[in-house]
Amino acid sequence: MEETRQQAAHFLDLIKKSRQGKFKIYIGMSAGVGKTYRMLQEAGMLLKNGIDVKVAYVETHHRAETEAMLNGLPLIPRRRLFYRGKELEELDVQAVLNLRPELVVIDELAHSNIEGSKNEKRWQDVVEILEAGINVISAVNIQHIESLNEDVQRITGVEVKERIPDKILSLADEVVNIDLTADELIARLKEGKIYTADKIETALRNFFKNDHILQLRELALKEVAAHVERKVDALVPPSAELRHERFLACISSNEKKAKGVIRKTARLASYYNGQWFVLYVQTPREATDKIALDKQRYLINNLKLAAELGATVIQVKQPDISDAIVDQADKYRISTVCIGKPRLSLFRIIIATGVFNRLLKNMASRHIDLIILS
C-alpha cells in the first residue's frame, strides 16, 4: 500500500513538472557583471525568432548599455502602489498570468516585495508564474543564496538581507554564470558602467576589492558547476552500484550557531545532489517546561531555516542522544551524519555522557560517515 502511494505521488510530481514552465537563471559574482544585459539580449533574439516574449520587470540601474537593450522589447506595465507616502513599483504577477506570454523576463530574483503584496518575495512570484506554465528568465547574484550567506559575510564583512533558498536554484532548468575577471569588473566600475561617479570610490574601498571579487567569483563558479553535476545525475541513468548520499545534520536547542551546521550540511547535500535531514533530540532536561525561552526561539528559527533550505526536519524525544542519532540514521538510510565543532553543546553532551566511542563504532558498523563541521 505504502509503495503504491509513493509511486502515485512520484507520478503526480512528474505530471506537475511537465506542466510547469521552463526556468533559466543568470547568476553572477556581483552587481555589474552583465546579467540583466544578457537576459535582455537573449529576449531580443527569441523575439526575432517568433517567441512571444514580454519583459515584466528589469532593473537597469540607469546603465546606458542595459537601457539600450530594452528598445523594441514589449513591456508588461509594473504595478504601482503607495507605501509610506511614496509611490513604488512592483512586478505585476496577475498581469503576467492574464497575458500568458511564452516567456517572461523577471529581474532581481532575491527582491523583497512591498508589505501587503500577495507574496513576500519575488522568487515566490516567479514560482507562481512557472506553475502556471509560463517560461521565466531571471537573475541573481551569488551573495543572495541562503546557504552561502555566512561565507559571503566572512568574505565581504556585509550581511546580505535579501536571500533566496537554495531550492530555487534546483528548480532551474538552466543556470548560466556571467563571469568576468576581477580586473575586468573593477575596470567597468571605474568607467562608470556600474555605479554613478559619486559611489565609485566607496565601492572600490569596500565590496569591489580584488580579493573579495576573486572569492565571490570562486563561489559562483562552484555553484554553477554543482548545478551541472546535479543535472547530469538527473539525466544519466543511475548505476546499481551508485551510493545515494543522504545527510543528517544534528543540532541542539541552546546554540545560536547551529545554523552554521544546517547551512554547511545544505551545501554538502546540494553538491552531492542528496537528500538531507535535520535532527533535534529533546532529552528530558530540555522538556518544554524546562527549556529557556531564548533557547526555544533559537530552536524554532533554526528548524524554520532548515525547512526553507529544503531539509526534512526530525524532532524526537529520547533520553540518549547517541541512540537517537543511530535510530534515525537507520530509519532514513543516512550515509553521512554531520555535527558541529566541539564548542557546540551537542558535542559536549556526547562527550560528557561517555558515549562518543559508541557512536563512532555504530557509525562505522553501518558504513556511515561522521563529519565534525568546523
Image (spheres, helix red, strand yellow):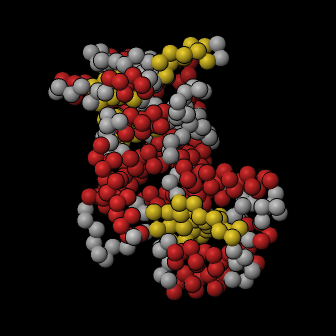
Residue 9, percent from left and from top = 37, 58
Residue at image location 63% in from the left, 64% down from the top: 315
Residue 53, percent from left and from top = 27, 25
* Count of picture labels: 0
Quadrant where the C terminus lies? bottom right
Residue 319, percent from left and from top = 72, 76
Q: Which residue is nearer to you in this view: 135 or 48?
A: 135
Q: Residue furthest left?
A: 49
In the depicted structure, whether residue 176 falls above or below residue 288: above
Q: Which residue is nearer to you in this view: 333 or 19?
A: 19
- The answer to whether residue 201 is visible is no
Residue at image location 16% in from the left, 27% down from the top: 49
In the depicted structure, whether residue 325 falls above or below residue 181: below
Q: Which residue is nearer to you in this view: 16 or 160?
A: 16
Q: Which quadrant of the view contains residue 194?
A: top left
Q: Residue furthest front?
A: 1
Quadrant where the N terminus lies? bottom left
Q: Is residue 114 left or right of residue 128?
A: right
Residue at image location 34% in from the left, 53% down from the top: 12
In the depicted structure, whether residue 194 falls above or below residue 1: above
Residue 298, percent from left and from top = 71, 53
- The answer to whether residue 125 is visible is yes
Residue at image location 43% in from the left, 63% down from the top: 274
In the depicted structure, whether residue 299 falls above or below residue 287: above
Q: Is residue 354 left or right of residue 326?
A: right
